[in-house]
Image (cartoon, helix red, strand yellow):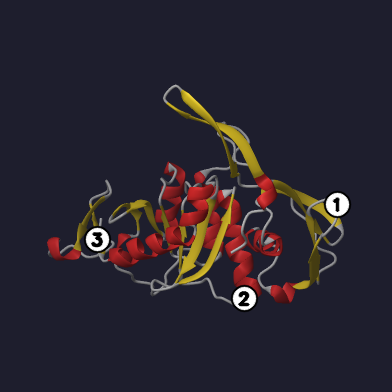
Amino acid sequence: MNLPDPDNDLTYLELNGDAACAACKPVIQESACTLYVNGQKWVTLLCTPNNLDALALGFLRTEGLIASLNDVADFSVRQRGEVGVDVRLKRQDLSLPLRPRLTSGCAGGVTFYDLAAAHYRLNTGLHLSPEQVYDQMARMLAQTADLYREMGGFHISALSDGNNLLLFAYDVGRHNTLDKIAGLSLLRGVATAGRFLLATGRVSTEMLTKAASLGVPLVASRNSPTYLAARLAREWGITLCGYVRGRRMRLYSAPERLGFSPVGEFLEFLPDSQIGGVSAGAS
């Protein structure tokens, strides 16, 4: 884990009731990192400046420009001047796409059906118990407990096989943590398909899309999903867990991976042992 730069200490006033005293603690760093692809300036990401090579490669992966390191000729992190990463792909004729933006208006926006068609249903053999989700979330949070108490202000994500945390990343941006996981998986040769992702941030459609691009069938977060992300999770067969805190959570989709079955069409989930003849996936 990359520790914060001690030069990021910030002096502030700490108040207790009406009393105030000066204090000084480190604050999480945020920098603009520009990604150059085949010599062309493509996108600038606001991020915590660690694991920048993983962030760049993971971003290219989740955006669909590369599938593995075999698609990359070379890459380097700029050490001086502008913070950035240069990536040269083996395909020199690749046209860099403009990143799509979702709008909430009626005209010109991306619809639910456009998004749903972007991925097929994930049918994997992954089956976990709720206890494994609780345990892995606790382990992930323990990784940065001291750092978070010291300064906070960042999100965490991890990749797990259900028993062990395989990859771990933190950043000021919740999306960046998933891109770093995607990049670290390439750099360290860790498969993502059939594993599960843990996160601390809200699960938006972009977060879920990144998870789907990695072949991850289960996403668990300490925060909530958006309504559209929950709908997409059902469409793609991704198990989506929100508000995972202690030994509690909310299960929004594909509950069969955790040994539960949906009853009716209003998200009523009951353990298999309490359902009798209703099978997993029935509605």
Identify the disc placed on residue 188: 2
- The residue lying at 70 percent from left, 48 percent from top is 7
Q: Earlier in the sequence, mark 1 or mark 2?
A: 1
Q: Could you tell whether 187 is left or right of 93 in the image?
A: left
Crowd around label 3: few <14 · some 14–19 · many ≥20 (10 Å):
many
Q: CA distance from mark 1 to mark 3?
A: 55 Å
Image quadrant in which the N terminus is located? bottom right
State whether residue 60 is above or below residue 101.
below
Mark in the foreground, 3 or 2: 2
Q: Earlier in the sequence, mark 1 or mark 3?
A: 1
Q: Position of residue 279 (x, y in %)?
A: 22, 65
Mark in the foreground, 1 or 2: 1
Q: Could you tell whether 137 is left or right of 281 in the image?
A: right
Of helix, strand and loop, which one carries label 3? strand
Q: Position of residue 266 (x, y in %)?
A: 27, 46
- The residue lying at 59 percent from left, 48 percent from top is 173
Identify the disc placed on residue 261: 3
Image quadrant in which the C terminus is located? bottom left
Crowd around label 2: few <14 · some 14–19 · many ≥20 (10 Å):
few
Identify the disc placed on residue 177: none
Badge 1 is on which residue?
A: 81
- Contact between marks 1 and 2 (CB within 8 A): the answer is no
Residue 170 vs residue 34, the one in the foreground: 170
Q: Could you tell whether 190 is left or right of 251 in the image?
A: right
Amino acid type, label 3 = Ser
Q: CA distance from mark 1 to mark 2?
A: 28 Å
Q: Position of residue 149 (x, y in %)?
A: 48, 49
Of helix, strand and loop, which one carries label 1? loop
Amino acid type, label 2 = Arg
Q: CA distance from mark 3 to mark 2?
A: 36 Å
